[in-house]
Image (cartoon, rainbow, N blue to C red):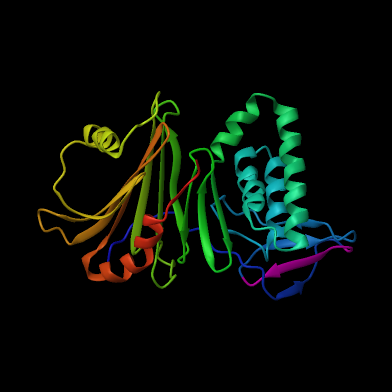
Amino acid sequence: MFKKISTTALLFIFSSSIFLLAQMPDWKFFKDRDGNGYYYDNTFKIRITDDKPFSYTPVTMQGVNYYFNKGVELIKEGKYSEGLFYLKSIKALPPDTLRVENNAKDSSKWINYLQKKHGTRYERFDKESTILLTYSNDEYIVINEKLRYKIRLKKQPHIIKASWKFNDTGYGLKFGFNLENNYEDNSYDCVTGIETRISRSRISSLSQAEMIWRYELGIDNFVRTESFRSEDRIIYLYTYGDNAPFSGIEGIFINDNMTHLLRVICSNSIKDNVFNEIKKPVEELVLVK
């Protein structure tokens, strides 16, 4: 099985809860089954109490109150990009309930406040929080807000790395998932990377995009079989020419002056099961025009 160590991000789903002894006489400590700790004070304001390191936790409709208050607390601590991840992910949820709609409105108010307070510095915070992650209607959605793509998944993705590069003309996202949703050993059955390059002018064809990537990455030993093609994407299935026990999916996408290279890798022993999960999401990667 293909393994890769990374920081674990836990899925928090608001579920039935227990009340524990409060630290303040008029506060009630609330902890859900996934370990999110916070207080309701006597005005029913949620106070965040946990001090977990930041990770890309899927923002859910059920837990929207928690994620809003977590985002606000991070902003108050000066962790603006981390806080914006939660607030912008809330705004990306479908407004199917009044609670989600109200939290989205409150998130917008905080975002507007940050824009007015920090001026041009806000642009950097906003750019650094380009990756959003939500869970609703039985699917996870990974969104790259600034580079205008999103991918829908049935298995929980764990963000391994997400960063700008090449003086903001490139971006790299890497995430993994497991078929059985078991992340105790911080390893993955499948890892997907999406690299983006931003050109000065419009990329006119898939052939041009392929040339960009082949020039940057050089010669490889992949044996590629074309699987899918449309106006803005071409998808290959690949194996290694040296019989390495891994297989994958490669996608090249174009959107105006941007090109994305997506690569999936997994062990041959679980290839069929992994492809059943990831092949369609790759083919249907949403490009926001």
| Residue 26 left/right relative to 135 | right
The residue furthest front is 231
Q: How many marks?
A: 0
Residue at 64% over, 43% down? 84
Residue 242 showing in the rendered view = yes
Quadrant where the N terminus sits is bottom left
- Return the x and y of residue 276 as percentages of the image width and height: 34, 68
Q: Is residue 69 magenta?
A: no
- Asked if residue 146 is positioned above or below residue 136 in the image, the reply reads above
| Residue 124 left/right relative to 281 | right
Residue at 57% over, 62% down? 135
- Asked if residue 139 is positioned above or below residue 198 in the image, the reply reads below
- Return the x and y of residue 257 as percentages of the image width and height: 41, 31
Q: Is residue 27 magenta?
A: yes
| Residue 282 left/right relative to 71 | left
Q: Quadrant of the rendered structure where residue 60 is?
A: bottom right
- Return the x and y of residue 231 as percentages of the image width and height: 35, 45
Residue 187 showing in the rendered view = no
The residue furthest left is 242
Q: Which residues are magenta?
A: 25-33
Closer-to-camera residue (116/211): 211
- Asked if residue 158 is positioned above or below residue 164 in the image, the reply reads below
- Return the x and y of residue 92 as percentages of the image width and height: 62, 51
Closer-to-camera residue (275/54): 275
